[in-house]
Amino acid sequence: MSVKSQSVAMARVTAAPSIETPRPWLYRSLLKRPLDMTLVLLTCPVVLPLVVLFALIVMLDGRNPFYSQQRIGRDGRIFRMWKLRSMVPDADQRLEEHLAQNPQARQEWDDTQKLRDDPRVTGFGRVLRACSMDELPQLWNVVTGDMSLVGPRPMMPDQQGMYSGQGYYRLRPGITGFWQTSGRNKTTFAARAWYDDCYERSLSFASDAAILLRTVSVVLGRTGC
């Protein structure tokens, strides 16, 4: 990362809002997981028909509607995260070609591990991503215990070298979280560590409820990634 990018990242981190409060042991250790399962079961009658509908639309292009990828979980354990497919089949090759031909895109990718104008994403995939509907299958990851509804955004194994935080590894990754709802699409990848450590220190029912409420605003505002 360039010196300029590091300065921008630190400025954004410094300006980021804090949610630090005393972390209740009871909620963290005994209540968070049962609450996740209860909410997943309550949303199943709505979520399952949506997943089926979106999967059928993706299948119209003759592609497998689901996509999985290895991610880092609690205690550094590798798990497979599921999503609705939103990219072309040769996504990795197309990304490398695009970055090789566009220095500005390469810098954006190195800083954020995302692209505002991503050539890998399909037309319907952009719709799914804009409202975060591509992430609905991750509710299955919550059921299996690999993820939580709220937690750090799951990172890929090859991103660990860019990540300096510790709180991430003490938690289940989340479908949504403090970083996703506070600085999504605006902060560098390296700046995520501050958000994740802050969330880990402040973990409580109140902080999770606030994040879930902010997630609704993010989805309705179509600011997903």
Image (spheres, rainbow, N blue to C red):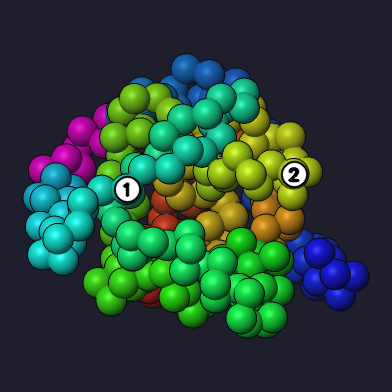
- Mark 1 belongs to which amino acid? Tyr
Q: On the rendered structure, is 124 left or right of 59?
A: right
x and y percentages locating residue 107 in the rendered image: 71, 74
The residue to which callout 1 is attached is: 67
Residue 12 in sight from this viewpoint: yes
Image location (x, y in percent) of residue 58: 18, 61
Query: Between residues 51 and 26, which one lies in front from this camera angle?
Result: 51
Per the image, the residue denoted by label 2 is 161
Indicate left or right for 191 with 215 as reference. Answer: right
Query: Looking at numbered disc 2 in the image, what kind of residue is underneath it?
Result: Gly
Left or right, 32 with respect to 186, comes to left
Q: Which residues are magenta?
A: 38-45
* Whether label 2 touches label 1, CB < 8 Å: no
Q: Foreground residue, 136 or 77?
A: 77
Asked if residue 206 shows in the view, the reply is no
Q: Is residue 88 above or below residue 171?
A: below
Question: Does the segment drawn in magenta span residue 67?
Answer: no
Q: Main secondary structure of the magenta part?
A: helix
Residue 126 found in image quarter: bottom left
Which residue is depicted at the point 39% across and 61% down? 90
Q: Is residue 173 left or right of residue 19?
A: left
* Residue 42 on the magenta span: yes
Q: Position of residue 13 (x, y in %)?
A: 76, 62
* Residue 67 position in % (x across, y down): 32, 48
Taking the spot 81% from the left edge, 64% from the top edge, the residue there is 1
Quadrant hosting residue 216:
bottom left
Secondary structure of the residue carrying numbered label 2 = helix
Q: Residue furthest right?
A: 3
